[in-house]
Amino acid sequence: MKRLTGIGASRGVAIGKVHFIDNVVKRVECDTVVDTVLEMERFEEARLKAIEMLEELRFAQMFSAMEDAYLRERSADMIDISSRVVRLLQGEAAYDVSQIKGQIIIAAKDLLPSETIQLDRDRVLGFVTSGGSQVSHSSILARTMGIPSVIGLGDQLAELVDGDMIVLDGFNGVLIANPPDKLLKDYHCKQAEYQLYRERLQTLKGVPSRTQDGVEIEIYGNIGHPSDVDSVLANDGQGVGLFRTEFLYMEYGGIPSEQTQFEAYRSVLERMNGRRVVVRTLDLGADKAAPGISLPAEENPALGYRALRICLKEQALFKTQLRALLRAALYGHLAIMFPMVISLDEIRQAKELVEICREELEQEGIPYGDMELGIMIETPAAALLSDLFAPEVDFFSIGTNDLTQYTLAVDRMNMKVGDLYDPRNPAVLRLVQIAAESARRHGIWCGVCGESAADRRLTEHYLRMGVTELSVTPASILEMREKVLSINLSTEKEHFMSRV
Ligand code: PEP
Ligand code: MG
C-alpha cells in the first residue's frame, strides 16, 4: 500500500485502476527550415485544424451543459490551443481522452480544459494530477461535473504505475495505491454514503436557508453565461451572486454592443424572476483577455492594468456596459459591483460614470431602472479601507480568490506555490472579518463569492462574522443550504480568531 497526499479539488471517492495519459506538450526542438512558405502553410493548416477540433468540443453537449463557464475564460485555453497546434505540427493527433476504454481513474500532469470537458462521467471515475491549484480550470470543472479529484501531487505521481488499483479520496486529498481489503471496504461504504447524501440533498429544494437560531442566509449561484441560469434554478438558488460578464466579451469576438449586452442581462434578470442578480462589471486583464480589447504585455499582470482600472481609463467601453445594465435593471432585481477596487476615488469615479449614463438615457428618453451598487472586496486595501467604502455603496461581495492571492502574495494560478494558497489563512480571515464588520456597522449586506464560499469549514466563521450571502458553483447550492441549516449562531463558541 502507498499513500500519497495532494489537494482535494473535488469531493467524493473514486475506486478503480489508474490510467496515465500522455498529454504533456512535447519539447519543441529548434530546427532550420529551407522552405519557409511550406512551413507557414503547415502552421496555418495545423492552426485551423486545432480550431476546428476545439469548435467541435465547444458545441459538445457536455460543454453546453456545464454549470460553471468560468474555465472558458481563462488563459489555460491558450495553452490548450498551442499544445494542439504543436502536436499537429509534430504529426500527432491531439490526445483524445474520449477514446479511453473501461472505467478508470485518469492520472496526468495536468488536464487541459478541453480534455476535462471530454471526460465521460460514466467511464472516468476520477482524476489525479501532479499540477493544478484549487482555482485552476481543471479543479473548477471537476467540482462542476462532480468528478472526484486530487491535484497537486507533484513527483509523488511517479510512484504509481499504470493499472494500479487506487482509492482516490477527494474529501481529504489523499490517494491510496493497492489498498488492503479492509480499507477498500471502508471506502466502498464511504462512497455509498456520499451517493445517498447527494440524493437526500434534493429534499432541501424549497427549504429556506435559515440557521437553527433563525438567521436568514442567501445562497446564490455564480454564473459566466446567461445559459448558466438553468443550473442556478435547477439547484434552487435564491439569486445570482456573481455574473462574470467578461465571458460575454470573450465569446463575442469583439466588444459586444449595448443592445447585445442589454439582451444578455435582461434574459438573466427575467429568468431569475425578481430574485437578486449581481452582475460584476468587466474584469479583464491579468489572466483574462478578450478579442477586440488589446492589453499591453506586462511583467506582473495580476498587479497591473486590469478590471476597474481598465474601465475607468476606457470610459466608452465602460459606459456601454453601464448603459446596458441600467436599461436591463427594469426587468428584475439588479445589483452591479465593481471588481479590484483599492480606493475611494475609484468608487466615486465609477459611481459618477453610472450617474452620467443615467442622465444620458434620461435625455435620450430611453427607459432605465434602479439597481444596487456594490464593490468586490478582493484586495487587502479594500478590506482595510472598508469602513470608508461602506457608506458609499449598497453591499460588499468578498472575492476570496483574489483576496487570498494578494494577501498571501501567492499567485492563484501557480501550482508551485499551490500549497501556500489558503483562504483559511488567518491573515485572509482577518480581512474578511474587517470587511464584514464594516458592512454590519454601516447597515449594508456582505456576501462571499470566491470559491471559499463553498468551503463548509469556513461557513460558520463567515456567518459569525456577519456574512449573509454565499455565492457558489450552482452544483454546491444545496450542500451549502444543508450546512447553513446545521448552524446555530446563538451558541457561545470560542472565537476562532483567539487561536490565531
Ligand atoms: C474572486 O477573486 O474571488 C472572484 C470571485 O473573482 P474571480 O475569481 O473572477 O477573479
Ligand atoms: Mg477576482
Image (cartoon, helix red, strand yellow):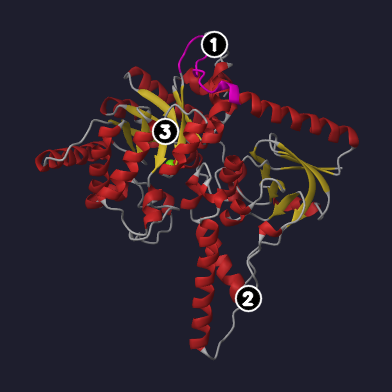
In the displayed structure image, the side of residue 200 where residue 210 appears, left or right = left
State the image coordinates of residue 184 (x, y, percent, origin top left): 84, 36
Callout 2 amino acid: Gln
The residue at which mark 2 appears reads as 90
Residue where numbered disc 3 is placed: 240
Which quadrant of the structure image shows residue 356? top left
CA distance for labels 3 and 1: 24 Å
Q: Is label 3 or label 1 in front?
A: 3
Q: Residue tagged by mark 1?
A: 212
Quadrant of the frame with the C terminus: top right
The answer to whether mark 3 and mark 2 are in CB contact below 8 A is no
Tell me the SS state at disc 1: loop
Taking the image as shown, residue 445 lies to the left or right of residue 208, namely left
- Which of the marked residues, 2 or 1, is nearer the chain's N terminus? 2
- Between circles 3 and 2, the one closer to the viewer is 3
In the image, the segment drawn in magenta is 202-216
Quadrant in the picture for residue 8: top right
Total tally of numbered discs in the picture: 3
Q: Earlier in the sequence, mark 3 or mark 2?
A: 2
